[in-house]
Structure formats: structure tokens, C-alpha cells
Amino acid sequence: MNSKTGQFGRRQFLRGMGACVTLPTMASLGSEKSKGIGTTETGAPLRTAYLYAPNGVILDKWRPKGLGSDFKLNQSMLPLEGFRDDFQILKGLNQKNGSPGREGAGDHARANATFLTGARPLRTSGANISVGISADQLAAGFLSQETRLASLELTCERTRNAGSCDAGYSCAYQYNISWRSKHRPMTPESNPRAVFERIYGSGSRDEQASSLAQRRAEKRSILDFVQQSARAMESKLDSADKDKLDEYLTGVREVEQRIEKAEKLGLPDDPGRPAPEGGVPRNYREHIRILFDMLLLAFKSDSTRVASFLIGHDGSNRSFKDIGVSGGHHDLSHHGNDEKKMKSVSLIDHFYLEEFAYFLDKMRSTQDIDGHSLLHNSMIVWGSGLSDGNIHSHEDLPIILAGQAGGKFTPGRHLDLGSTPLNNLFVRMLEEIGLSGASFGDSTGSEKRI
């Protein structure tokens, strides 16, 4: 077990060789809400997630019509219609350090690098990369003693290039949005198996490796390794908590089975792509959803309260044949106002918001310790480091803020913030977890209007 687990109050775990399954809070085991850092007013954990979609959007199809609560979702955002009261669309947020300035080209690298750091990256393709600490890692450092995992970093990008990726900028800028320090990115994980083992693995590396090898050889579940602990715990539970335990463990097993299925598959769905590494689904939508499902489990069990998800890196030229779009996303984003290309990009925008709706539905359907939903007790940013991919604009970014931070935010609105640093939003979110006085990038204060 990680040595930090002794500091987690009455949180409950199922333990076995190389395995540690963190459980949701249960009243019959003495679990209780406790007001502290990183919690809501009710004492429930406050979760924070930063989700990134690449290459900007077609603003005319994305931006809602009308302001305040009297807004109408546009074509690209229609997948979110059923969640109008769970999010707010924030207009006017800028990330000025992503703009060309003296450096000129390299907007895709800067879009990723600046999104959560607010800092201007040093133009280099060597080892002397430098940008800034990201908002998620400020939160993770502040909350590191509260959970088994300080943070989760996820991505659907299976290939990570080295050297120069965009106009002399290091690939490290383009493939990372989370930075522990100005010189050190937090490399996101694309392999669902690796994410699963990080969440539920325990003990030394040898113990974890032995547990995984044994499970594979004997075709067993990680839950088989914690059966004795589960039986001992179940005898102490009331009927409601028994149902809660069963529902949670069923969810863990379902995700594990989907990973196992992906590990058995061979050829990728796109002939132009290499065969997937073990555990990575061939289908892009399934890849996104299985990572979202593991993030849900991590939030539900309070294994972590901070996550970032680079769904696709800026400059990604992925094709979307499953939705009838054969061209590459990056190529299409430079549409030159060609209506056919713009329609294709808007279909991609619609696809990404379908996946966001999938995650919101999971979060809203899961009850938290205080009777509210996980979504109510969360702050979830969905956005891109570019607004108009055709002209590489870093102003008026497409930003959605979902969740209510336990009642502190006012969703159900399309809010015009004028011309405001995106970093002001992140400063406000850091304040909600208890980290006051944070300032980075071009932040001018905390955004109070949300």
C-alpha cells in the first residue's frame, strides 16, 4: 500500500497481493462527510477535471444563440441539450500566451502548452523545455495528502513523437497539457490497462507485476485477489451499503472486461494506423469512453480528485470515418471557409460533445455521499486552446464549465465574460478547493461571475 493511505481517515479499501480497491464511502462502515480542504460545504469531495478537444471549432455551429438562461444550443452542441441545467458556456475567455507574438508559427504546440499553464512556452526542440506549472498540478499538489493518487492524466493519443513537432517547438508541448513544473510535463496515459493498474494496483512493482501476470495466466479478475477482504467487509454492511458495494464492484469488473476484450483484438480500424498496444480499443469512441469510465470510478471512490484528459492533441489529423468524415481533422480545420470542409469539422465538434455528454450522464447518474450527484460536486472544464482553427485564434475560446462545485457555481447559462483571461477561471476553481491567492499566466484575479 502507498504510505499515504494511513492519512485517509475512515476511507475503506479491499486489499490483496498487488491490488488495492478503494471503495466509495459507506455509512455502515463509519464513513462520514467531513468539511476540509478539497470538499464542498456538505463535506463531500470536490472533484476537478480538465478535458481538452483539439483544433478549435466551427464557431457559427458551436456558439449558442442568446445569453443568460435564455439560450438555444446550436448544431454542434445539441448532444448537451439534456444537460442545460448542469453546465454554463463561458464566452470571451482568452489565452493570450498562445498567440504568435514574436515567435510566429507554432500555434498548435502553444495551444496545448498554454491551455492549463497560462505561460508562454520557450521555443525549443531540445531538452531545455520550459513553460509553467499547470492549474491541475497546483490543485494536485495542494490535495496530494487527501487521496491515493494526487492526479490522473489521460489521453487517447497512442503515438508520442520526440524532437520538434510544430515550427521548432518540442513535441513535449504538443502532447501534454499537465505540467508538474515548468520543465517537467506529467505524461498522460493512453493505455486503459495501465490506467486500471494505476488505480487498483498496490504494493511493490514486483507485486503488481506478479498480480497482473497471474490474473492473465489464470484468466482471473483483480477482484479475485481481494475476495477475502470483500467478504470480511460485506459482513459489516447494511443492505443499502451491500447494494452500493455490489454496484461499484460490478462497475470495476465491467471496465476490466472491456480492457480484456481490447487486449484480445488485433488490427486497428484505420489501416493507416499501427496496431494498438495491448488494452487500447481499436475504436476511437470506445477508447474515449473507457477512459471516461475509469475516471468516473476514480472519482466515485475518491481515489483522486484531480484529472486532466487530453482527448486529442492540437494539430491531430485523425480521420473520423465512423461519422462520415474521411479527411484529417487538422487539414479540415484549415477550411478556408469552404462549406463542405466546415460541415465536416462541425460533425467532429458534434462527435466530441457527444462524448462529453456521455461522461456528464455518468457523473449525474452517480450519487455522492451527501445525496447529490458526483456532477453536482464537481468542476469540469471542457475546452480547446484554439477557437477558430482556420486562423489559429486563441481568443474567445470554446469553454464549457460543468458541475456546480457543490452549489458554488450557477449553471444553466450562456455567460459573456467580455475579454477575460482563461486563467481567471482556473484561479477561481483553485479557490474552491481551498487554495487561495494562486496566480499564474496572465491572470488578473478570480472569476467571480460563474
Image (spheres, grey):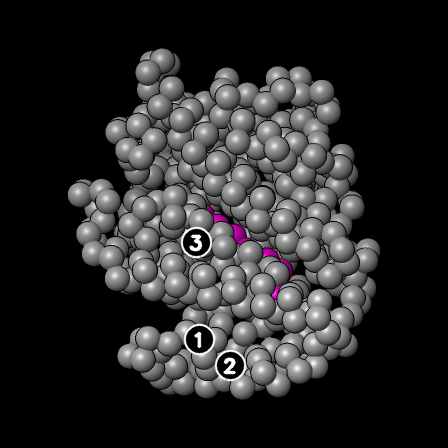
Magenta stretch: give its range: 301-310
Query: How far apart, in angstroms, are the residues tagged by discs 1 and 2?
Result: 7 Å
Query: How far apart, in angstroms, are the residues tagged by discs 1 and 3?
Result: 17 Å
395 displayed left or right of 265: right
User: Tag 3: Cα neighbours inside 10 Å, few (<14), some, or many (≥20)?
Assistant: some
Of labels 2 and 3, earlier in sequence is: 2
Instruction: Residue 219: tell me if it is visible.
Output: yes
The x, y position of residue 64, in whole percent, is 59, 21
The x, y position of residue 391, in whole percent, is 41, 23
Of labels 1 and 3, earlier in sequence is: 1
The x, y position of residue 68, in whole percent, is 73, 23
> Label 3, on which residue?
290
> Label 2, on which residue?
226
The quadrant in which residue 85 appears is: top right
> Label 1, on which residue?
222
Query: How far apart, in angstroms, are the residues tagged by discs 2 and 3?
Result: 23 Å
